[in-house]
């Protein structure tokens, strides 16, 4: 079991309680990661002292196409994104899709992340 997959459903009908149980072996690492991002992360409006502001758009590559015409989501788990559309295109391949996230409007300006 790896860290990233412990946040995701292993099958479509998996209960949240099962995900939490599986993720429990990463409890302390998850807690520390969340606190590090909240304390030292960057947002649209402010840097963290060492790094500048974290401004989108951000792209996430998926290896398959999902039927979602539009969405509004809050990512509260480690998520790999890039600010380079070219990198996202390469990662998604010929059969995938790219999700675009923007943090320039509304409350999303205050969400924190880390540029690693």
Image (cartoon, rainbow, N blue to C red):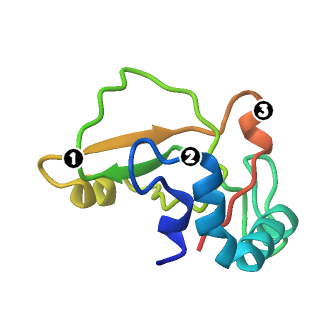
Rounded to the nearest angstrom, the CA distance separating label 3 from label 1 is: 29 Å
Q: Considering only order in the chain, which callout, 2 or 1, is on the residue closer to the N terminus?
A: 2
Look at discs 3 and 1 and give the one toward the viewer: 1
Q: Where 86 sits versus 27, above or below?
A: above
Q: Where 105 sits versus 16, above or below?
A: above
Q: Are marks 1 and 2 in contact (CB under 8 Å)?
A: no
Which quadrant holds the C terminus?
bottom right
Rendered residue at 36%/20% (across/down): 69
Q: Which mark is residue 15?
A: 2
Say whether residue 27 is left or right of residue 101.
right
Residue 78 at least partly seen: yes
Say whether residue 72 is left or right of residue 99.
right
Rendered residue at 59%/62% (across/down): 78
Q: Considering only order in the chain, which callout, 1 or 3, is on the residue closer to the N terminus?
A: 1
Q: Image quarter for residue 48?
A: bottom right
Q: Secondary structure at mark 2?
A: loop
The residue lying toward the viewer, choosing from 116 and 96, is 96
How far across and down, in percent of the image, does residue 81 sit? 48, 57
Look at discs 1 and 2 and give the one toward the viewer: 2
How far across and down, in percent of the image, does residue 66 sit? 29, 34
Task: List the residue tagged with mark 3.
Answer: 107
Rendered residue at 47%/78% (across/down): 1
Look at discs 2 and 3 and give the one toward the viewer: 2
The residue lying toward the viewer, choosing from 63 and 7, is 7
Task: List the residue tagged with mark 1.
Answer: 96
Rounded to the nearest angstrom, the CA distance separating label 2 from label 3 is: 29 Å
Q: Secondary structure at mark 3?
A: helix
Characterize the local packing of mark 2: few (<14), some (14-19) or many (20 or more) Cα atoms within 10 angstroms.
few
Rendered residue at 64%/64% (across/down): 21
Rounded to the nearest angstrom, the CA distance separating label 1 from label 2 is: 27 Å
């Amino acid at each position: 079991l790896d860290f990233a997959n412990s946040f995701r459903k292993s099958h479509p009908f998996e209960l949240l309680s099962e995900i939490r149980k599986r993720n429990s072996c990463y409890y302390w690492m998850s807690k520390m990661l969340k606190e590090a991002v909240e304390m030292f992360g960057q947002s649209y409006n402010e840097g963290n002292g060492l790094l500048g502001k974290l401004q989108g758009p951000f792209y996430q590559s998926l290896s398959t196409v999902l039927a979602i015409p539009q969405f509004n989501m809050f990512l509260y788990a480690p998520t790999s994104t890039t600010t380079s559309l070219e990198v996202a295109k390469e990662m998604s391949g010929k059969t995938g899709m790219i999700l675009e996230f923007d943090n320039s409007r509304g409350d999303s300006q205050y969400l924190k992340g880390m540029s690693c």
